[in-house]
Image (cartoon, grey):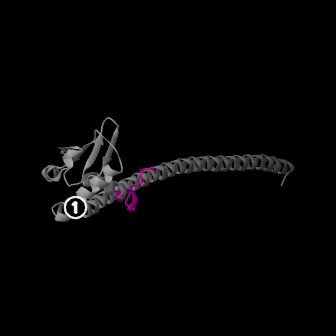
Amino acid sequence: MSVIDEKLQRFENIIFSDVDSKVNATIEEADRYKENALSEHHEQIMDKYFDYMQDQVHLIQSDIKRQMAKAELSAKRELLLYRNQISEKVFQNVKKQLSDFAQSSDYKTYLMNSIRDCTDSNSFPDAKILVRQEDLTFLKENDFNQHFTIEQDSSIRLGGFILLDKSAGMMIDQSFDSKLNELVSYFIQTSGLMINQEQ
């Protein structure tokens, strides 16, 4: 090989070496760019997927809350219906027993004694005794109208009486109707079947 060929070969080697290093650097830079671009794209996809998952979690949580509220409302409604059924059965029976008692001869004795007890312990000169229609005649026949005005009151259906003195601003309600209403209210409050409105 001649000197020129040798120089040419060295020159060629230098040029190809330089070209190879530039090509390799360009390939490495392209690989890095590709890797960075893929990594950024991967992160963007992951961010979008994460946002989507968060949205789905919120939707599921909202749906669960709605379903729970609906189930709770349904349970309260069922409890209310059940409580009303129990109350209706219990108090229809109590009402029947009061009605049966008010038809008995013991009731007349009870009514007279109750009125006497109430009027003996209180002095109300302007008092009225309010009773149901069925008791009006009976009480007048037993001279209760000598000391008090006895009147019929349509709010009294089951029996008992109301002692009313408007001038003294006093009313003593001994009617079976009001006692039954008090009993119903007490039952609802203490039966363990109250519906809790706080929540």
Give the structural element (helix, strand or loop) at label 1: helix
Q: In x, y percent, where is residue 3?
A: 87, 50
Which residue is nearer to you in this view: 83 or 41? 83
Residue at image coords 36%, 51%: 121
Q: In x, y percent, where is residue 21?
A: 75, 49
Q: Is residue 81 visible?
A: yes
Q: Which residue is mark 1?
A: 109
Q: Quadrant of residue 95?
A: bottom left
- 197 sits to left or right of 149: right
**Most frequent secondary structure within the magenta stretch:** loop
Quarter that holds the N terminus: bottom right
Residue at image coords 19%, 51%: 157
Q: Quadrant of residue 75?
A: bottom left
Q: In x, y percent, where is residue 181?
A: 29, 53
- 102 sits to left or right of 42: left
Q: In x, y percent, where is residue 35?
A: 64, 50
Tell whether position 31 is magenta.
no
Residue at image coords 13%, 52%: 141
Residue at image coords 28%, 56%: 114
Q: Which residues are magenta?
A: 187-199
Which residue is nearer to you in this view: 118 or 154? 118
